Image (spheres, helix red, strand yellow):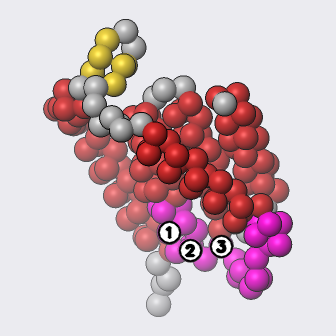
Amino acid sequence: MYLVLFLIFGGLCVAGALNLLFQRHPINSALSLIVVMSSLAVLYLLLGAEFLAAAQVIVYSGAIMVLFTFVIMLLNAGREERTHGSKAAYAIGIPGAAALLGALVYIFLSNGDLLGPTLLGASWVVPTVFSATLFRDLLLPFEVTSVLLLVAILGAVALARKEH
């Protein structure tokens, strides 16, 4: 089962990366990068790194890609042509999303103890101890990163501002 999931999401990751390189429009490239980041999150799950998978989805697929999309739209990197979507995306995307949703429902319904202690390395770690370490000992790097992102947004706004 793990090998099949690895091959599926590894292939999806490689296909998203190739699509990222061959797209002409920057918005489509950003959407392909979201596919790559989400596929990497599933690969982290397969390796047993649940926290890294959640951080990958929340930080990279969510926040960073929203920032990229915001900067691309703010800089107005070219006029987009309107399309009605790809027929291949509808043919593959809708059944793929349904299969992924079914797999997630099966996993959540078959495993009742998802919020209990987790085996992390060679010892068991309770989520409260892990989160306390993360937000107490590693608070400074977390805040420095948030300030850096704020400065990047302000820099993009300053660059994109039109002179009157």
Snapshot quadrant of residue 30? bottom right
- Which residue is at a point 48% across and 63% down the rendered structure image? 66
Tell me if mark 3 has few (under 14), some (14-19) or many (20+) residues whose alpha carbon lies within 10 angstroms of its own: few
Residue type highlighted by circle 2: Met
In this rendering, is residue 117 above or below 154? above
Q: Position of residue 108 (x, y in %)?
A: 44, 44
- Label 2–label 3 contact, CB within 8 A: no
In the picture, measured across the screen, residue 47 lies left or right of residue 148, that is right
- Which residue is at a point 36% across and 19% down the rendered structure image? 119
Does residue 24 show up? no
Badge nearest the viewer, 1 or 3: 1
Q: Secondary structure at mark 3?
A: loop
Task: Indicate whether residue 135 is drawn in magenta.
Answer: no
Q: Position of residue 79 (x, y in %)?
A: 71, 82
**Tag 3 residue:** 77
> N-terminal of the two: label 1 or label 3?
1
- Label 2–label 1 contact, CB within 8 A: yes
Q: Which residues are magenta?
A: 66-91
Residue 34 numbered mark, or none: none
In this rendering, is residue 26 above or below 127? below
**Tag 1 residue:** 70
Q: Secondary structure at mark 2?
A: helix
Does residue 20 show up? yes
**Tag 2 residue:** 73
